[in-house]
Amino acid sequence: MPITYQIVGCTNPRGAEGVDYATNRAVKTGDYDFKSLAEDIQFATTVTKADVVAVLTAAKEFIKTHLLQGQRIVLEEIGALQANLQSKCFAQSVIPAESFDPSSYIKKVGIRFRPEADLLKYVRTNKTLKRVPSELLA
């Protein structure tokens, strides 16, 4: 199955005035959900669907727990997950103040995914591409 993309407009901060720019963006073609994963594993192995769902559900709970404990989740040959914070900068002079609350500077909490090098290499090597219609190519 190809990676689908479309051409979309973008801004180039170093570009010339009055020039329109475009770039390629990957387009989501659907979702591969928990149920689909469980069914695929069931058909590819001798394990029952109930057992697969039980294992995946337990794995999901352990991943959530360990992310909240600050641990990096390493999924061999897939990649690693780690909790991530985006924070505003603040003056170091406010740190020793008794009323200082560092959590008030946190703007966003997320999860960073870093793919394994072999997975990334596989996708880059074996990719096929398909362009979908775009407003810019009318």
Image (tube, rainbow, N blue to C red):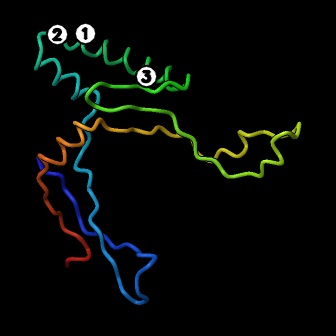
Identify which amino acid the numbered label 2 is placed on.
Val
Give 39 or 82, whichever is nearer the viewer.
Answer: 82
Identify which amino acid the numbered label 1 is placed on.
Asp
Q: Name the residue under label 2.
A: 47
What residue lies at 43% left-to-right and 22% top-to-bottom?
63
Quarter location, residue 32: top left
Q: Mark 1 points at which residue?
A: 51
Identify which amino acid the numbered label 3 is placed on.
Ile
Mark 2 vs 3, N-terminal side: 2
What residue lies at 43% left-to-right and 89% top-to-bottom?
17
Q: Residue 81 carries which label?
A: none
Quick check: 100 left or right of 10?
Answer: right
Pinpoint residue 43: horizontal percent, then vertical percent: 11, 19
Residues under labels 2 and 1: Cα distance?
A: 6 Å
Pinpoint residue 108: horizontal percent, then vertical percent: 58, 45
What residue lies at 83% left-to-right and 46% top-to-bottom?
94
Q: Are marks 2 and 3 in contact (CB under 8 Å)?
A: no
Mark 3 vs 1, N-terminal side: 1
Residues under labels 3 and 1: Cα distance?
A: 18 Å
Of tags 3 and 1, the one toward the viewer is: 3
Q: Do the residues labelled 2 and 1 touch (CB within 8 Å)?
A: yes
Q: Residue 63 carries which label?
A: 3
Give 47 or 21, whichever is nearer the viewer.
Answer: 21
Of tags 2 and 3, the one toward the viewer is: 3
Pinpoint residue 42: horizontal percent, then vertical percent: 15, 17
Pinpoint residue 112: horizontal percent, then vertical percent: 44, 39
130 up-or-down from 84: above or below: below
Q: Which residue lies furthest to the right in this view?
A: 98
Give 119 or 136, whichever is nearer the viewer.
Answer: 119
